[in-house]
Image (spheres, rainbow, N blue to C red):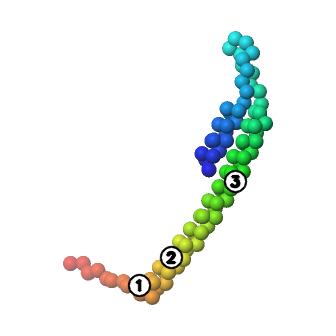
Amino acid sequence: MKSITIAALLILALACKVEKTGKDTYKVVAPTPEAKAAAEKAKVEAKELGDKAKQGAAEAAVKVGGAMEKAGEKAKAEGTKTEKRVKH
């Protein structure tokens, strides 16, 4: 997601029109409508990607939770074993 944000900022930066107004003087004009549309599209795609990532993380958490529960049940069934160590 970080790379998408960087890409959107790069698109905006490149889409600005720079005009030379004199010796060592430049004028930056606001982004063109095409650049604004591209930035909006990138923003929507980033949001969709973020939503997919959240959904994938939730599914992974459910699977891990199930595995942890099974491991806990197995440990409970076997019982806890304590041993005393004898010092020689």
Earlier residue among tags 1 and 3: 3
Q: Which residue is mark 1?
A: 80
- In space, the residues marked 3 and 2 are separated at their CA atoms by 31 Å
Q: Is residue 31 above or below residue 81?
A: above
Mark 2 against mark 1, which lies toward the viewer?
2
Tell me the amino acid under the disc marked 1: Thr
Tell me the amino acid under the disc marked 3: Lys
Q: Which mark is residue 8?
A: none
Rendering coords of residue 49 (x, y %) = 65, 55
Q: Is residue 76 above or below residue 23?
A: below
Residue at image position (70%, 36%) is 12
> Which sits in the foreground, 67 or 15?
15
Q: Which residue is mark 2?
A: 67
Q: Which residue is mark 3?
A: 47
Residue at image position (76%, 33%) is 31
Earlier residue among tags 3 and 2: 3
Q: Secondary structure at mark 1?
A: loop
